[in-house]
Image (spheres, grey):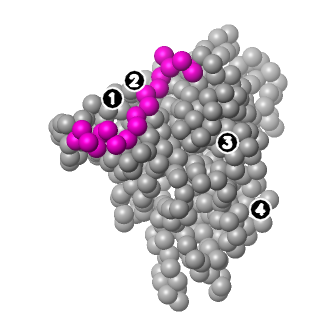
């Protein structure tokens, strides 16, 4: 990119914010626009003085590049200014770097944040792009960096409203971590086979001499690992020839890996340990010694909305998590129950998008039922779903889950609090705004 003034439409989104911060680091003059709703990125945007204007504000006169969020349509051409979706802008920003890409439906933010903290502790100035509001111990979720390697949280969602390619299709990773491969985003991926094709093509994009770090206990990952010399029935994926498979180094990881028991972390849960293991293996591939990587991973203290401790109020332990897929919910609940075996777990879940909720309804119900006392918030309706008919409501969703209580935004905090006792854990989960309940809990 040669431009020096960038304007971000939808700058409060975690991905938009991360790239804006990294470009600001790199010497760009950055500003943007968004709604007046509060977001988890508000504090860092104010701290870095990145001038957030109202969403309908005109683009500044001296702008060279407009970057827009996938949540919005491309802006009308303004004085022949170049506009590009976030995924394209990110790909161009890192095109001269050796990209360490972290993909997967669950775990990619945590693993990316772990890598950023690990390399920082090891004294390497890697740039990073992580979709969260904050990373404990680091100044921001986006950084330019001076190292040849660059950490990218690689999103499987669509590039834009009109371009349904996965965002990660625009990247060429030197090192790729796939935490898992699970069907999600039914508005983009009709079924498991289309999800599998997208991830398989990402693996095939690794250049000769690159590395794929994969967990073979994940069923769809195992299918890709077995593709040598054969086609995948039911998808458009072409065969992976023996020569193709040999050009990329494959590192398999899991709970049986010798490094797994050597990890010393401040975060809990098997999934966090697996994510940390993947980060350690990637760091070694990028030049750290085994001892450096295993020592430095201990610097990770958490990221915003990832099993984030929000405080203790009247004996209740408050936590928040971004998980919004049934598999993420299941793993998170299990990790809390293992870490706090004597505490009752109250789950307050806000499902993200009607399309996902309807497509995975039974899986959601089974996962949420693992909590001791579940509460169901109103379903988050995405901008693309407004005006459409829906087959599920908050109330009908709650009836599928034993002992679940449907909530409204007006009564949620009070009802959850009145059902809780000292010693309980109150865990909010979802990709919407459920985390805002914590401020209300602290006032009750």
Q: Would you identify the image quadrant in which residue 38 lies?
A: bottom right
Question: Which x, y percent locates residue 310?
Answer: 75, 34
The x, y position of residue 268, in whole percent, is 65, 23
To which residue does mark 3 refer? 119
Q: Secondary structure at mark 2?
A: loop
**Measured from the top left, where is residue 147 in percent x and y?**
64, 53
Q: How many marks?
A: 4
User: What is the distance, in whole Å, between disc 2 and disc 4 at their CAs?
Assistant: 42 Å
Question: Is the residue 30 above or below the residue 151 in the image?
Answer: below
Residue lying farthest to the bottom in this orientation: 79
Report, in whole angstroms, how far the alpha carbon at label 3 lies from the one at label 2: 27 Å
Q: Is residue 210 left or right of residue 234?
A: right
Residue occupied by mark 1: 222
- Of label 4 and label 1, which has the lower sequence position? 4
Identify the image quadrant of the C terminus. Answer: top right
| Residue 372 location (% of width, % of height) | 58, 17
């Amino acid at each position: 990119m040669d431009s020096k003034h960038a304007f971000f439409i939808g700058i409060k989104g975690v991905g938009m914010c991360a790239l804006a911060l990294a470009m600001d680091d790199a010497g760009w003059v950055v500003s943007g626009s968004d709604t007046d709703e509060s977001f988890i990125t508000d504090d860092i945007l104010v701290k870095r003085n990145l001038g957030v204007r109202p969403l309908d504000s005109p683009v500044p006169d001296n702008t060279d590049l407009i970057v827009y969020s996938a949540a919005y349509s491309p802006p009308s051409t303004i004085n022949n200014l170049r506009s590009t979706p976030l995924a394209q802008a990110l790909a161009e920003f890192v095109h001269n770097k050796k990209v360490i890409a972290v993909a997967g439906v669950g775990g990619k933010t945590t693993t990316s944040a772990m890598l950023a903290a690990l390399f920082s502790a090891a004294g390497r100035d890697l740039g990073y792009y992580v979709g969260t509001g904050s990373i404990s111990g680091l100044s921001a979720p986006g950084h330019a960096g001076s190292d040849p390697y660059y950490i990218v949280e690689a999103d499987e969602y669509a590039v834009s409203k009109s371009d349904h390619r996965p965002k990660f299709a625009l990247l060429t990773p030197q090192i790729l971590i796939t935490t898992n491969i699970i069907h999600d985003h039914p508005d983009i991926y009709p079924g498991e086979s289309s999800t599998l094709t997208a991830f398989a093509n990402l693996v095939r994009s690794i250049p000769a001499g690159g590395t794929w770090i994969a967990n073979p206990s994940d069923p769809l990952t195992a299918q890709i690992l077995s593709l040598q010399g054969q086609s995948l029935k039911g998808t458009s994926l072409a065969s992976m020839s023996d020569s193709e498979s040999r050009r990329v180094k494959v590192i398999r990881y899991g709970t049986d890996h010798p490094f797994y028991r050597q990890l010393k972390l401040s975060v809990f849960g098997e999934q966090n340990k697996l994510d940390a293991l993947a980060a350690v293996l990637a760091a070694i591939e990028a030049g750290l010694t085994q001892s450096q990587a295993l020592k430095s991973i201990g610097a990770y203290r958490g990221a915003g909305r990832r099993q984030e401790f929000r405080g203790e109020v009247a004996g209740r332990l408050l936590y928040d998590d971004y998980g919004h897929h049934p598999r993420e919910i299941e793993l998170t609940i299990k990790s809390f129950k293992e870490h706090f075996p004597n505490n009752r777990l109250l789950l307050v879940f806000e499902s993200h998008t009607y399309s996902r909720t309807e497509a995975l309804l039974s899986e959601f119900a089974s996962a949420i039922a693992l909590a001791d006392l579940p509460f169901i918030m109103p379903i988050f309706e995405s901008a693309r779903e407004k005006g459409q008919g829906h087959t599920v409501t908050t109330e009908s969703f709650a009836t599928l889950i034993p002992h679940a209580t449907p909530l409204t935004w007006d009564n949620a905090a009070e009802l959850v609090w009145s059902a809780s006792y000292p010693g309980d854990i109150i865990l909010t989960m979802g990709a919407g705004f459920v985390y805002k309940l914590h401020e209300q809990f602290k006032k009750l």
